[in-house]
Image (spheres, rainbow, N blue to C red):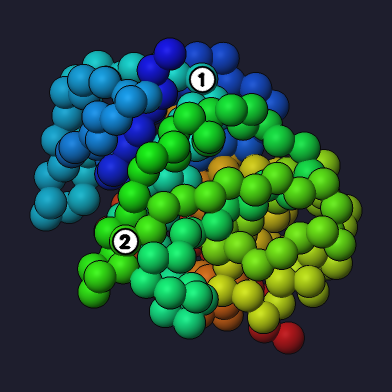
Amino acid sequence: MEFLALRYIDLNLEVKKPGRRALSGLFHPANLLNSMFARILFCFWLITVNQSIAVAAPLSYEEYDIKAAQIFALAKSYVTWPTPSFQSNTSPLILCILGNDPFGDKLDHLLRGEKINYGNNQVRGIEVKRVNRIEDLEYCHILFIDASEKTRLPKIFEKIRSWHVLTISEFEGFAQQGGIINFFFYGKTIRFEINLDALSRVGLKISSLVLELEGIKRIREEKD
């Protein structure tokens, strides 16, 4: 089985059968990472001046193949964690899934054997952990919160308040309630919204190449 793996943001990947969950298309494949899961040929290019994308023929994929690939591309190329969030230069980046796991084995296959080179002798693998209860949640760098946990968001955010963690989900209102990245459907494609205040609060940085892409919704929290 082949899996989609991306290095660049693409807002034009189509979902084979869009469901009711929120979705987002993020990565823009001027290049695609050919790994054990993906050998996908795209015919499009990035026009750097205005950050627009031209696509010759859209391809379609399963919803969670796209989401898994987007999460991987964010971690690999676009999000920066502060050094103190890792124990050493070779400590893995830990990705946790809280609640029901909609990915199945897609993330495991996609990330197996992959390394992220952040420079300065920092080369990290990626470790996937699944947690059913908030009480069992331990430090992680990416936390995917399933929609089954949406009524427990305040308790989750309190648990991870001091962590440098990129929170991701896919249900309406997640970013507005303090989550960082939320996937949503836009037609047959996958887009995402990003809460810039929540991102800053946890000490993470995301590349301006992501923030400037047309189709990315940037959210600011209302101040009292």
Q: Which dot marks residue 62?
A: 1
* Circle nearer the viewer, 2 or 1: 2
Task: Report x, y in % for residue 223.
Answer: 67, 83
How crowded pointer 1 is (Cα within 10 Å; few <14, some 14-19, many 20+) is rated as some
Image quarter of residue 134? bottom right
Q: What residue is shown with label 2? A: 123
Report the Cα–Cα distance between label 2 and label 1. 30 Å
Pick the quarter of the image with the N terminus: top left
Rendered position, 174 above or below 196: above
Rendered position, 93 above or below 86: above
First in residue order: circle 2 vs circle 1: 1
Viewer-closest of 170 and 213: 170
Task: Report x, y in % for residue 190.
Answer: 48, 34
How crowded pointer 2 is (Cα within 10 Å; few <14, some 14-19, many 20+) is rated as some
Viewer-closest of 83 and 28: 83
Task: Report x, y in % for residue 95.
Answer: 57, 52
Is residue 112 shown left or right of residue 127?
left
